[in-house]
Image: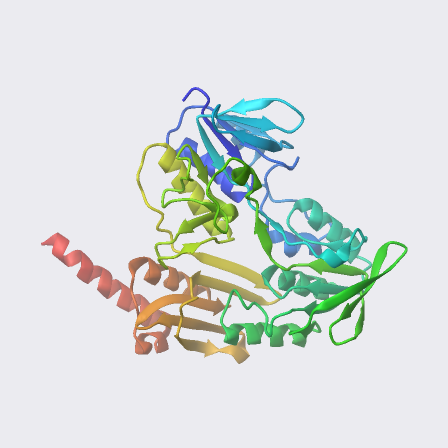
């Protein structure tokens, strides 16, 4: 390939794609374009340790020498304005262009905005290191903060700010926290635990208007009529996939950039991965778009193999995590079709798991401070193994023994 592979987006997906191309033996040009001027960094710590510690620095995904040492042409602070499909060329902001033989779109997603916010100071979303720095700078002398949205990002920040002594109120429009993400029993546990450390949680509530003083937010009025003092308002009401570049080029769009099981878009020379990609998921049989580091990483690895001519179909088991105060939440599988669940462990001990079934089949496990359950769950779902209720009651030892027995039985015919 004369012009090689160009990757648009230098987050978890884009950097892994560049790395995987080299690991798979691709020896052509690899160009990685990032719109930030930073060396690519881990994003999960931004809502936790980075905000909490004034001395914390970004954690690079790869050291600077990785890019030069692997002949990866990393270009920070570069924005793409248009894809010229006919010429196989990117038009770059500020002029100039970049030709490609294969293109990987790892454009990610961006936070939904709050129309009420206008241009007031003190209102933040969290997606980048710049956002995290701004939140950290203000949190040092922030007495009151209002978090809009009871999803993972909002709750992680709420727990972090509260640990720093800030008065925090979480506003969630739905009737419970984490409505799109986890089971009601775990959501209720998170709610109770946050309130126990002094976070005020208001569900089935919305913000009706914001009050300001000298151009800086000072309070939020909510649907009950109450006025909440707010030196800082953090908006965590979901994200929007960055599909505009693909859409302008005429690529198929359906809740993200539509790709097949090999990560190819409707134009086979262009692939899409990570938060922005919508794809047919082997586990559910439905099209999904997932926002997780695991999803981004596994997409990237497969995209590299696709470019090298392999025909693997995406088959990774989906898993996620979130650290909210003293709760490590770990989720494996996709539980949207669950119609039965079993709770293992004691919520009062802040250590338990929820096993989800769709009919007779295990489809997911959600855990609070039970990492062994999570790891076993990843293995079971990868093998297509469904435990009995008795095995679950027996805990990790019983589950490990059952998995080993099945593995031995499955291997037996091959040995004969």
Quarter of the image containing the N terminus? top left
Q: Is residue 97 above or below residue 308?
A: above
Q: How is the image coloured?
A: rainbow
Residue 363 picture quarter: bottom left
Residue at the spot 38% in from the left edge and 57% down from the top edge: 286
Quarter of the image containing the C terminus? bottom left
Residue 377 in percent (x, y) is at: 38, 64
Q: Is residue 176 above or below residue 17?
A: below
Label tally: 0
Asked if one can make out residue 213 in the rendered structure from this viewpoint, the answer is yes
Residue 157 picture quarter: bottom right
Q: Is residue 356 above or below residue 156?
A: below
Q: Is residue 52 left or right of residue 84?
A: right
Residue 175 in percent (x, y) is at: 60, 74
Residue 340 in percent (x, y) is at: 39, 76
Q: Is residue 124 left or right of residue 215?
A: left
Question: Which of the two residues, 332 or 213, is positioned nearer the viewer here?
Answer: 213
Residue at the spot 52% in from the left edge and 73% down from the top edge: 186
Residue furthest to the right: 214
Q: Is residue 44 above or below residue 322?
A: above
Residue furthest to the left: 416
Residue 280 in percent (x, y) is at: 38, 51
Asked if one can make out residue 9 in the rendered structure from this viewpoint, the answer is no
Residue 375 picture quarter: bottom left
């Amino acid at each position: 390939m004369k012009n090689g592979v160009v990757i648009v987006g230098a987050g978890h997906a884009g950097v892994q794609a560049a790395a995987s191309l080299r690991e798979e033996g691709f020896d052509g040009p690899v160009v990685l374009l990032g719109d930030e001027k930073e060396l690519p960094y881990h994003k999960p710590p931004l809502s936790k340790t980075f905000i909490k510690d004034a001395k914390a620095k970004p954690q690079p995904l790869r050291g600077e020498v990785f890019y030069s040492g692997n002949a990866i042409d990393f270009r920070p602070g570069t924005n793409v304005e248009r894809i010229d499909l006919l010429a196989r060329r990117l038009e770059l902001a500020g002029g100039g262009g970049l030709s490609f033989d294969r293109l990987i779109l790892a454009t990610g997603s961006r936070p939904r905005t709050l129309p009420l916010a206008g241009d007031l100071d003190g209102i933040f979303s969290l997606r980048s290191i710049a956002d995290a720095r701004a939140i950290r700078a203000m949190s040092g002398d922030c007495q009151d903060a209002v978090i809009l949205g009871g999803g993972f990002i909002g709750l992680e920040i709420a727990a972090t700010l509260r640990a720093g002594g800030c008065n925090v109120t979480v506003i969630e429009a739905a009737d419970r926290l984490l409505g799109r993400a986890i089971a009601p029993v775990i959501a209720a546990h998170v709610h109770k635990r946050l309130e126990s450390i002094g976070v005020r949680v208001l569900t089935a509530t919305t913000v009706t208007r914001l009050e300001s003083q000298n151009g800086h937010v000072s309070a939020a009025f909510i649907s009950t009529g109450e006025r909440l003092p707010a030196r800082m308002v953090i908006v965590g009401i979901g994200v929007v996939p960055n599909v505009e570049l693909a859409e302008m080029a005429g690529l198929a769009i359906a809740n993200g950039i539509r790709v097949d099981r090999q990560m190819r878009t409707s134009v086979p020379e262009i692939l899409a991965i990570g938060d922005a990609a919508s794809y047919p998921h082997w586990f559910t049989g439905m099209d999904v778009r997932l926002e997780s580091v695991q999803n981004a990483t596994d997409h990237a690895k497969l995209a590299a193999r696709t470019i090298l001519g392999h025909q693997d179909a995406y088959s990774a088991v989906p898993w996620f995590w979130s650290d909210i105060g003293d709760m490590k939440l770990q989720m494996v599988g996709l539980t949207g079709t669950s119609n039965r669940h079993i709770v293992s462990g004691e919520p009062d001990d802040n250590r338990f798991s929820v096993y989800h079934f769709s009919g007779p089949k295990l489809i997911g496990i959600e855990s609070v401070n039970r990492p062994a359950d999570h790891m076993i769950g990843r293995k079971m779902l990868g093998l297509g193994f469904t435990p009995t209720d008795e095995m679950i009651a027996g805990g990790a030892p019983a589950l490990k023994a059952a998995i080993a027995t099945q593995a031995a039985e499955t291997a037996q015919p091959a040995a004969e």
